[in-house]
Amino acid sequence: MRVLIIGSLGGQLGEATSIAVKSGAKVAHVDGVATALKALRAGQGADLLMVDVSHDIKALDEALQNERIHIPIVACGVSATPTQAADSIRAGAREFIPLPPDAELIAAVLAAVSDDSRPMIARDPVMRKIVDLAEQVAPSNASILITGESGSGKEVIARHIHSKSKRAAKPFISINCAAIPDNLLESELFGHEKGAFTGAVARRVGKFEEASGGTLLLDEISEMDTRLQAKLLRALQEREIDRVGGTKPVKVDIRVLATSNRDLQKAVADGSFREDLFFRLNVINVQLPPLRERPGDIVALADHFCATYAAANGVPARPISDEARHVLLNRSWPGNVRELENSMHRAVLLATGDVIAAEDLRAPDGSVIGAAPTHTGHGADNAMSHHAAGAAQRAALGVVGQTVAQVEQDLILDTLDHCLGNRTHAANILGISIRTLRNKLKLYAGHGVEVPQPGDSRAAGAL
């Protein structure tokens, strides 16, 4: 992960930088907003900007938006008041980190935008075969399509392929095609020339050029607009790109990997994905099984996450009890490795004994994972059944009289609210593409409906 620090490295911000480096980040430093923009335009890529609150965060955020540069901002401040923290968020920062820095908080912020530090753990025979295939094809320059459910580790194996390739010493650049709006994605990928659009005050180098000599990962490629798919196909075929507003092609030397949690063959059939691009990307297909189909990895991953989060939080490293291991192995893990990681992080923080016990394994709502429902006899079972039936009947009556469109709108907005405005997570839960979700939300907003924004919640806003 690449972090660009904006501001003086003296004192507490310098300490925050040291913590970021210890967390595995590659850190660069500039003294101000103007210098930062100049570096970003020239191709000094960054996955995160950490900015001293004494700098003009609003001007930085506006410049990034105007020049179609998509990088999250985290504000930092010494002894900042709640008002200053809120002002920095309103100015465009995603998060605020108080200084003196907290190692756990910085690690959490870095982890939120990066999978850099995740090792390739594969103990299950099914997974070992997949890793062997990945390592066999890694030295080639062939494009590789990595498929699998959300949270199954697609980016982790992409980084592993890069590390085993002839390009390992060169950059590995990842871009999430689902997280960046279509009007920004073209400039992110291909860059732009000065004057290409309003706000393009200078030439900007895109991800293709940033990854020169190395590997470019196109995460969730299925969400890319069909117009951009055509431009991407040409880049893969000709090994050259056209910057937005450019008049001559730019040669590039990169290896392209792509991931998708959707069935791209179905996307080809329904016309949302180009068939020629699918074949160009799918020279080799690496299909990751969900965690439930590779049980031999569950305990190994759990042990790794326990050790990682114990160290990050400064708590004793506890072994996982036999009872807890049994619970882990008997859960289906619908959220895959990501869900397991979050569960073990909670367990590390909740454990009080010498081991991580089964009761330390809890869901986000606090309930014990794998706990059997309480039974007090057939009478209680019948009461529970009647209660469940009554709840289902009341839920059904709640939507009687509404149109399908109204029910759909409520479902989409409630799911988005549950995900705190995260479009990608909501789309995955709903089983629709991010593009479909965005179109629905645009329609609702056009009708005056309040739509939760990233990090927002309608429920929280009502308190």
Image (cartoon, rainbow, N blue to C red):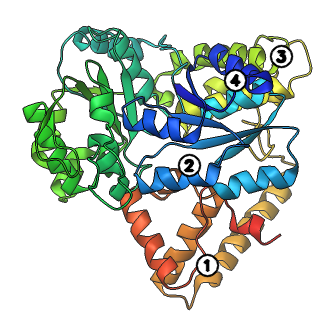
What residue lies at 58% left-to-right and 36% top-to-bottom? 49
Is there a contact, CB below 8 Å, between mark 4 and mark 2?
A: no
Q: Secondary structure at mark 2?
A: helix
Q: Determine the CA span between mark 2 and mark 3.
A: 35 Å
Is there a contact, CB below 8 Å, between mark 2 and mark 1?
A: no
The amino acid type, in three-letter code, at marker 1 is Ala
- Residue 446 drawn at (x, y percent): 47, 82
Q: Determine the CA span between mark 1 and mark 3.
A: 49 Å
Report which residue position mark 4 lands on: 9
Q: Earlier in the sequence, mark 3 or mark 4?
A: 4
Q: Secondary structure at mark 3?
A: loop
What residue lies at 33% left-to-right and 8% top-to-bottom? 164
The amino acid type, in three-letter code, at marker 3 is Gly
- Residue 15 drawn at (x, y percent): 76, 20
Q: Can residue 114 be seen? A: yes
Report which residue position mark 1 lands on: 396
Mark 2 crowdedness (10 Å alpha carbons): few <14, some 14-19, many ≥20: many
Report which residue position mark 3 lands on: 314
Q: Secondary structure at mark 4?
A: loop
Task: From the viewer's perspective, tell me whether residue 79 is left or right of residue 76.
Answer: right
What residue lies at 50% left-to-right and 30% top-to-bottom? 292
Report which residue position mark 2 lands on: 60
Up/down of 5 relative to 195, above or below: above
Residue 113: quarter of image: top right
Q: Secondary structure at mark 1?
A: helix
